[in-house]
Image: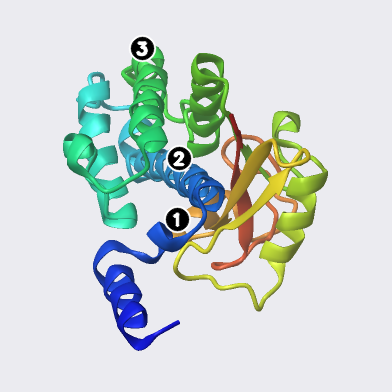
Amino acid sequence: MNRARAIVIALVTVFLGHDLLLPPKVRANSEVVETGRLLAILLDAGRVTIGANQSLINDPERGDKNFPPEVFEKQLIAKFKERANVDLVNLKTEKVPELAKKLLPALVDAEKQVVTDYQIVINKQGVGFKGFIPATFGTQAAAKFRAKTGVYLKQTMNPPRNPKNTPDEFEARVLKAFADPSYPRQGEKIVSDTVDGGKAIRVMLPLFYLKGCLPCHGEPKGEKDISGYMKEGAKEGDLGGAISVKIQLK
């Protein structure tokens, strides 16, 4: 490679991005991986949004909680932008894969539909714990999204509280890696792989327990939490599961 060509490639890499130098198939796969990463973050952003409103949802003194799907969506968009640096309001102009521009709005719609479905429960006065928690929300939003798009999306943990979240072989292997103390707890570092003989991409995003998770998942281990499940005895920063995505390649 002569010096002039090397300089041109270097400039292209700096100004247009390294992906443009990759073979088309590799570049396409990297775009699918990025789409999977964004979907995982968006689902968890919805879970976090529900968690942030848990005391409001469970307030027995209030009837109308003023938490309709529109309010949820506004908070979701803000949380997602904070974590993914992507503005869902102006998604058409964002530098994300075209597949993501198609699938992210579908997931937002699925998440809003779950909040819509639970309005009667959320606004029920005289009842404290409503059973509408981040995990319940995540399971139902993922199911609605998968039914609409055909894209595999789920929460998983080993062992799971909900049998529907039981990990498959790939998920169990990645969860084991996530649980290793050396795995980065910051930066939302994903694991991705090409599977099924090159026919699909899998992406997993680890979920680590935050302080707000510990009333249900912390100490003392074996004691029932407010939802009736046994506490795991977890500490802040321990692995709390993962969001798993599988996207078929065309």
> Tag 1, which secondary structure?
helix
Percent position of residue 154, x then y: 60, 35
Give the mark nearer the N terminus: 3 vs 1. 3
Q: Which residue is mark 3?
A: 120
For the residue marked with disc 3, what is the amino acid? Ile
Q: Where the C terminus falls, by quadrant?
A: top right
Q: Which residue is tagged 2?
A: 39
**First-in-chain label (3 vs 2):** 2
Q: Alpha carbon of mark 3 to alpha carbon of mark 2: how far?
A: 28 Å
Q: Residues within 10 Å of mark 1 (few under 14, many from 20)?
A: few
Q: Position of residue 209 (x, y in %)?
A: 54, 59
Identify the residue at horizontal 24%, vertical 38% (top origin): 88
Residue receiving disc 1: 212
The residue tagged with tag 2: helix, strand or loop?
A: helix
Asked if the residues shown at circle 3 and circle 2 are in contact, with their CB atoms under 8 angstroms apart, the answer is no
Q: Is residue 177 above or below residue 43?
A: below
For the residue pair 10 and 59, the one nearer the viewer reads as 10
| Residue 59 shows up from this direction | no
Q: Earlier in the sequence, mark 1 or mark 2?
A: 2
Residue projecting furthest to the front:
2
Can residue 135 be seen here? The reply is yes
